[in-house]
Amino acid sequence: MIRRTFLTRALGVGGLALLPGWLRAEPNQHAMHDMASMGDMPGMDHSLHAAPKLAAADALPRGMALRELPKLANRSNQPGVFSGELIAAPTQVELLAGQPSTFWAYNGTLPGPLIEVREGDRVQIRFINRLSQPSTIHWHGLPVPPEQDGNPHDPVPAGGERTYTFSLPKGSAGTYWYHPHPHGHTAEQVFRGLAGAFIVGAADDPLAAIAERHLLISDLKLNADGSIPDNDSNDWMNGREGQFVLINGQHQPTIALHGPERWRIWNACSARYLKLSLGGHKVSLVGTDGGLIEQAQELQEILLAPAERIELIVQPRATGGHVALTAEVYDRNKMGSVAAESVITLAHVNLASGTPAKLPALLRSIPALGPSTADKRVVFSENMRMDNGQHQMDFLVNGKAFDMQRVDLTSQLGEVELWELVNDSHMDHPFHIHGCQFQVIEHELNGVKTPAAYRAWKDTVNLRPRETVRVKMAQPFKGLRMYHCHILEHEDQGMMAMLEVT
Ligand SMILES: [Cu+2]
């Protein structure tokens, strides 16, 4: 159904203009008839009708102090056990004055509540699904057993519930998140508001003395009447981007530094790439998806692909002063006639004067994964073909669209493997694998190999057009794992595959 609706979306009257010139064709009679007969399908883009107008770019209030993420309450009184409840349900939020929007939210908050636990904790989350669709919760990046990881094979039906339980081992401290992963509905459930942050704290954290701040960045496409539009054909091709980029659900908030701060940043956007800059102010990268790196890396800009996370140390500036946190222009080679990219202001930051913190020379040791004894090759590609006289866009892994019944690769438990991740397409795609962290070994582009600049644990890595990235990993649990493009529209259309660990 997902591919079918995309096909009609792509050929909708409004959608035609968005196709690249070499793909444009007049829809034939059959296609037009087909489209009309499918007008009542759920989630259908009624391209023949006038689309509601998008809210103006300045329609949301801005400049409020950045609020903290709401926290999920721990209902357990046992030491070492975190027990909480997440309810996914339609929730009315009035972002535009007098024009309430219906989001889908966890526990009524946008984003969902922050889950904060410690290494060694046992986690029990009761999930109640009050949506009209099946859903799951995927614990993005966490080392949890496959049957607890919200695979599309384990849907929680509309009106149903289940409890996810897992333990977090020593060494798993890091910056994670959670979001739905049901078959074919992931993109919609996330863009309607379902996502939240998950932090695993370390017992021996070398940066524990530095104040933490959390910035979960998400993207919002909003109509002027407050409704949240379905994906259009452009969203299905390039991944959805809205006219608003929010931090902790706020538009262009202000942040006042009172001294050195440790920022954890999540790119929870469906498709937007964030080339982050703090007005030229140097910051120190201290962590990636799976926790601290070995040595702090000083930088002025960093690219955060969809689903990636980082930890930065932001030091006060002797002269104080205001800077903007921005997403600089990054060209990810979108298809069709899309608007020119521009710099996006995410927040206004006051770098009050203060004393910078001295960082330890070694944050932690990350042992290199040893020699690999098995290889894998994963190729992301796109394909436009004719099907029944209509254009059909495919997003593929190793030449195939996702099939819930097909195991694509198998791995042995604990075996170190070298995965060659290839982007054989013209557009950036972020690769993500469930349930484990990998180490990037090298990037290869145009025949030039570049070793990773530092050792780090990651679960998501961007693949530039025609780029190959080599990573090493070892699977910690037996069972079924998903790996896919984390542009959620591409994932839903088939750029996903399955690994069985035996
Ligand atoms: Cu993709």
Image (tube, rainbow, N blue to C red):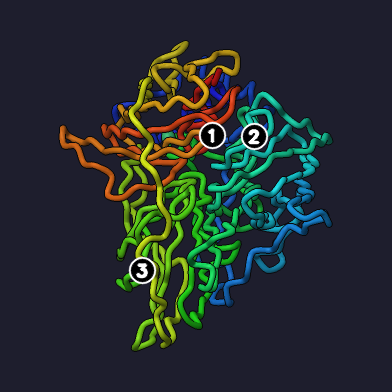
Q: Amino acid at mark 2?
A: Asp
Question: Quick check: 171 left or right of 134?
Answer: left
Secondary-structure class at tag 3: strand
> CA gap, disc 3 to disc 2?
34 Å
Residue at the image position 47 percent from the left and 81 percent from the top? 259
Which residue carries the number 2 mark? 149
Whether residue 342 is visible to the viewer of this picture, yes or no, is no
Q: Kindly check if marks 3 and 2 are in contact, taking CB atoms under 8 A apart as contact.
A: no
Disc 3 packing (10 Å; few <14; some 14–19; many ≥20): many
Q: Quadrant of residue 238?
A: top left
Can you say whether 25 is above or below 97 in the image?
above
Closer to the camera in the image, 457 or 100 = 457
- Circle nearer the N terminus (1, 2): 2
Which residue carries the number 1 mark? 434
Which percent across, then down, holds residue 225? 65, 57
Closer to the camera in the image, 72 or 340 = 72
Which percent across, then down, holds residue 226? 66, 57
Q: Amino acid at mark 3?
A: Val
Which residue carries the number 3 mark? 283
Residue at the image position 71 percent from the left and 51 percent from the top? 105
Q: Amino acid at mark 1?
A: His
Disc 2 packing (10 Å; few <14; some 14–19; many ≥20): many
- Circle nearer the N terminus (3, 2): 2
Residue furthest left in the image: 447
Q: Kindly check if marks 1 and 2 are in contact, taking CB atoms under 8 A apart as contact.
A: yes
Q: Quadrant of residue 122?
A: top right
Can you say whether 391 is above or below 182 in the image?
above
